[in-house]
Amino acid sequence: AQTVTQSQPEMSVQEAETVTLSCTYDTSENNYYLFWYKQPPSRQMILVIRQEAYKQQNATENRFSVNFQKAAKSFSLKISDSQLGDTAMYFCAFMKFGAGSSGDKLTFGTGTRLAVRP
Amino acid sequence: GAGVSQSPSNKVTEKGKDVELRCDPISGHTALYWYRQSLGQGLEFLIYFQGNSAPDKSGLPSDRFSAERTGGSVSTLTIQRTQQEDSAVYLCASSLVGLWEQFFGPGTRLTVL
């Protein structure tokens, strides 16, 4: 079974600054995806960024980038030029690749609540 | 196109009552997932549907929980004899089988008094 750990329950950052959210995971699988999801107060889960485990290059999406350390099983999210709209709960998640009949269920961490201060 | 929808948005019930939560996935999405988001516990997987069958029910916490899917579309999650610990946000997601991206609904917040 996989586990995902987010050790920062809450974080705060000044608008326009950079913040890094931490995530570690444990798995015996070799092929998997890692995700960061954003959940604003509306409760709608929004995919922020995805990383395939077989790719060495870190994924980037505009102001969002990850630091993927496969050997260390670490997957942190960096948000640059933080904006007020980034205020949300952020979840790190794991998905086994090619799970077959078990589907592609996600295993989530407990989340980090990020507040962006004006 | 329309996204995943869930109803009701909020549900308050008394302990011991049965509740039904509904999920309408994106049209054509054959895979459907239910997750539960409890305070301080993140999101946990409940059940996975492929079409109308549920090959993975491993996350259902007790036999008071059941789910069905009809016509390869709408799914209902039923909780019988609700308990206070069932209070949570129940999220539904759908995807095309074999593709990684899951699209989430807005969830149903269930409060058991």
Image (cartoon, rainbow, N blue to C red):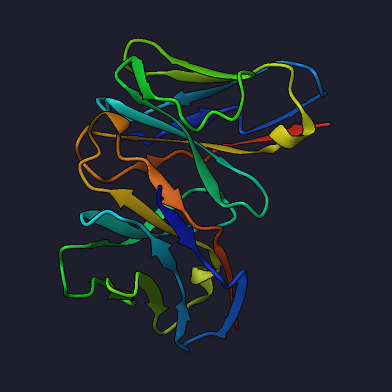
- Expressed as whole percent of the image width and height from the top left, the position of residue B46 reads 49, 33
Q: Is residue A27 above or below residue B28?
A: below
- The total number of labels drawn is 0
Q: Can you tell which quarter of the image residue B29 is in?
A: top left
Q: Is residue A95 above or below residue A58?
A: above
Q: Can you tell which quarter of the image residue A73 is in?
A: bottom left
Q: Residue at x 41, y 63 (%)?
A: A25
- Expressed as whole percent of the image width and height from the top left, the position of residue B16 reads 80, 18
- Expressed as whole percent of the image width and height from the top left, the position of residue B94 reads 35, 34
Which one is in front, A68 or A3?
A3
Placement of the C terminus of chain B among the 4 image quadrants: top right
- Decide if residue A11 is on the left or right side of residue B104: right
Q: Can you tell which quarter of the image residue B9 is in?
A: top right
- Expressed as whole percent of the image width and height from the top left, the position of residue B55 reads 34, 22
Q: Farthest residue toward the top?
A: B71
- Decide if residue B96 is on the left or right side of residue B36: left
- Decide if residue B36 is on the left or right side of residue A49: right
Which one is in front, B100 or A5?
A5
Which one is in front, B94 or A27?
A27
Q: Residue at x 22, y 62 (%)?
A: A53
Q: Residue at x 16, y 63 (%)?
A: A54
Placement of the N terminus of chain B among the 4 image quadrants: top left
Q: Residue at x 39, y 74 (%)?
A: A76
